[in-house]
Image: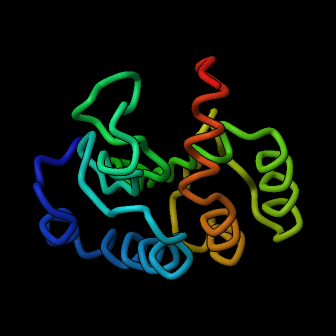
């Protein structure tokens, strides 16, 4: 379910009470660990953490009006989604993340970049904080350029 909220505050306010706690907790971990240079925004109907266009004006997929995404966080109908582009775009980070998730005793439900969880307790917040902190803006841009063939 995509939100029409224009701001993160509006997004959180429109959530049912039982979903606000988890979203606020994950957002807090993201903000506490987010490397300098990323910006919190709304996009694709969810909260996002992106490389600002002022830093990477080429834009995501060559769209000059769309910032390069790093993290997305959303409340869906039956679960929450946490999109981690550094896990998707870097095999070393992916391997570390999967092992850390397992070592934390949690069951990982993940697509290419999307970690799905039903309750806050399903997510090892310490692992999330570490993976958020792992990739600087410069590293994300370089990994993105390599994946799409620019050097």
Residue at 12% x, 66% y is 10
Of residue 145 and residue 104, the one placed in the foreground of this image is: 145
Q: Within the image, what quadrant is residue 129 found in? A: bottom right
Residue at 66% x, 37% y is 89
Q: Is residue 151 left or right of residue 9?
A: right
Q: Is residue 20 above or below residue 84?
A: below
Q: Is residue 97 above or below residue 122?
A: above
Q: Is residue 86 left or right of residue 92?
A: left
Residue at 57% x, 49% y is 84
Q: Within the image, what quadrant is residue 126 found in? A: bottom right
* Colouring convention used in this rendered image of the protein: rainbow
Q: Position of residue 115 (x, y in %)?
A: 59, 49
Q: Quadrant of the N terminus?
A: top left
Of residue 106 and residue 31, the one placed in the foreground of this image is: 31
Q: Position of residue 104 (x, y in %)?
A: 82, 71
Q: Within the image, what quadrant is residue 105 found in? A: bottom right
Furthest-top residue in this view: 149
Of residue 82 and residue 39, the one placed in the foreground of this image is: 39
Q: Is residue 104 left or right of residue 11?
A: right
Furthest-front residue in this view: 151
Q: Position of residue 34 (x, y in %)?
A: 52, 71
Q: Is residue 38 left or right of residue 123?
A: left
Q: Is residue 118 above or below residue 31?
A: above
Q: Position of residue 76 (x, y in %)?
A: 35, 48
Q: Quadrant of the C terminus?
A: top right
Figure disc tally: 0
């Amino acid at each position: 379910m995509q939100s029409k909220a224009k701001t993160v505050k509006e997004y959180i306010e429109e959530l049912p009470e039982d979903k606000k706690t988890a979203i606020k907790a994950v957002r807090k971990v993201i903000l506490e660990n987010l490397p300098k240079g990323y910006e919190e925004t709304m996009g694709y109907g969810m909260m996002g953490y992106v490389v600002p266009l002022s830093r990477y004006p080429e834009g995501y997929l060559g769209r000059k009006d769309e910032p390069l995404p790093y993290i997305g966080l959303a409340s869906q109908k039956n679960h929450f989604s946490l999109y981690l582009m550094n896990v998707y775009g870097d095999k070393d980070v992916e391997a570390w993340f999967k092992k850390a998730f397992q070592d934390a005793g949690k069951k990982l439900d993940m697509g290419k970049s999307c970690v799905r969880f039903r309750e806050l307790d399903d997510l090892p917040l310490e692992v999330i904080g570490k993976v958020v902190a792992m990739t600087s803006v410069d590293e994300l841009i370089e990994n993105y350029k390599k994946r799409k063939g620019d050097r």
